[in-house]
Image: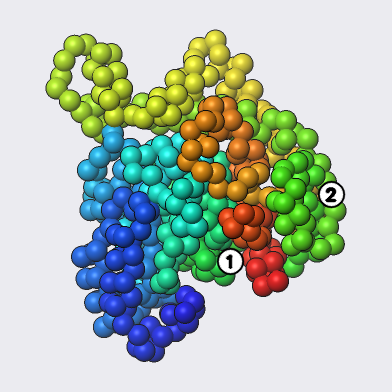
Amino acid sequence: MNIQEYLEKVKNREISIVKIVEKITKEAKSSPNHFTAVANSHAIKRAEQLEKNPVGNLAGLPISIKDCICVKDLDSTAGSEILQNYRPPFNATVIKNLEKQGAIIIGKTSQDEFGFGSFSVNTKKIPKNPYDQTRSCGGSSGGAAAFTSYTKQPHIALAESTGGSIANPASFCGVAGLTPTYGLISRYGLIDYANSLDKIGTLAKTVKDAFLGLYNSLSYDEKDSTSLTQTISKEKKVKKIAIVKESLEVDKDIKDLILSKVKDYDLISLPNVKKHAIPTYYIIAMSEASTNLAKYCGIRYGATSDLKGNFDEFFSSVRSKHFQKESKRRIILGTFARMSGFRDAYYLKAQKVRTLIINEYKKAFKKYDILISPTMPIIAPKFSEIEKLTPLENYMLDTLTVGPNLAGLPHLSLNAGFKEKMPVGIMLTTNHLEEEKLRTLGEEIEDN
């Protein structure tokens, strides 16, 4: 039963919402570390209410929420011990929008701490890939994508992307991951990683379902200074597509799968994206993360301990204890990049290069409606393989996803097929606010 069939049955009172919610919360609890918290009693109580009065476009639909998006009275920790037991007294705007349409929040999904990672291993309980539990489900929205693939019930996952955190796990878990135009979904209530990059999006089994989640998440929000007043363009027709030539420098099997899904395309080159996207992204993201995480000092926000020593000693002891290794690395690198004497050389220069990358994409979209590439250069790696990677090798694996995220462009990852019985993702990228073109081509690829 797909989501459209389920919603129709709910509307006609032909199915029990309570039974569906009981089944999916049971799956959530038994899943291999896909959840940090399951809202069992709250979800069933809400299901009982909606069963009596199924109001809204999503009436009775179970939705999981990435751990960095605030849900009132539900643990929201962004995968970090420094926020352990934090229960927000409010809902993020996107949660309000979804609940207004009758969605049922079933729990919070696992992620890398504050979104720092590509494999969801920078967290205490590592989520496992449903295709092979010795492999990563991708990151940082790993739990969201993995459970979307794992569950047998109608379900949409709400996730977040900074440099590819929706597309990456969508690829590794064989589901559809939609990252919209920056500012299209309000970020109010999102626990920040990097403000100028963070975007809330959706994961679902199909492209159609991912867009259903998007449509019901939208609203202009005066509480978010980056919230767009514009809406999605109604233009759906895809006239010309191109494959990014540099993106095909991957494993031959992955390349062949991508090419088999596309007809009538041109090859184009994006040299600035290839050369500069990774260093530009990591300088900007780490600098902004360093600033955002400074507030977790043990005095106003986050975990604390006994007051001992001077401020620097107390500040350092709390953060040393509660931040993981990767978070510490990114804080230190980001702090260095924005220090006096280095800010102009690194952070501000990176912002200028970012503009260069945006302009390169804009030039391409004057001729083409959609740009295509593999989502990831590899299939989901085994945990034993991840342990051998250096930090730089880790960062380089984001080479295909950071470009669209730097430019704030909407992109969609969907399954292109399988290599060694593991999913391979194909990524479609289009111009700002032209998500409907992604839907047109995405559904066409999915149906063939």
Q: Identify the amino acid type marked 1.
A: Val
- x and y percent of residue 73 in the render? 23, 53
Q: Please name whichever residue, 219 or 398, is drawn nearer the observer in this view of the structure.
A: 398
**Relative image position of residue 231 (x, y in whole percent):** 58, 60
Q: Indicate which disc residue 426 carries.
A: none
Q: Is residue 291 left or right of residue 165?
A: left
Name the side, left or right, on which 174 lies relative to 290.
right
Q: Is residue 353 visible?
A: yes
Whole-number angstrom distance, CA of label 1 to CA of label 2: 25 Å
Please give the name of the residue rendered at 74% of the width and 62% of the height, measured from the top-left corner: 261
Q: Position of residue 93 (x, y in %)?
A: 38, 55
Q: Which residue is mark 2?
A: 267
Q: Nearer the viewer, residue 180 or 317?
A: 317
In the rendered image, the residue lying farthest to the left is 306
On the image, numbered disc 1 is attached to which residue?
207
Q: Nearer the viewer, residue 120 or 312?
A: 120
Q: In the image, 403: left or right of 154?
A: right
User: In the rendered view, would you say 356 is above or below 441?
Assistant: above
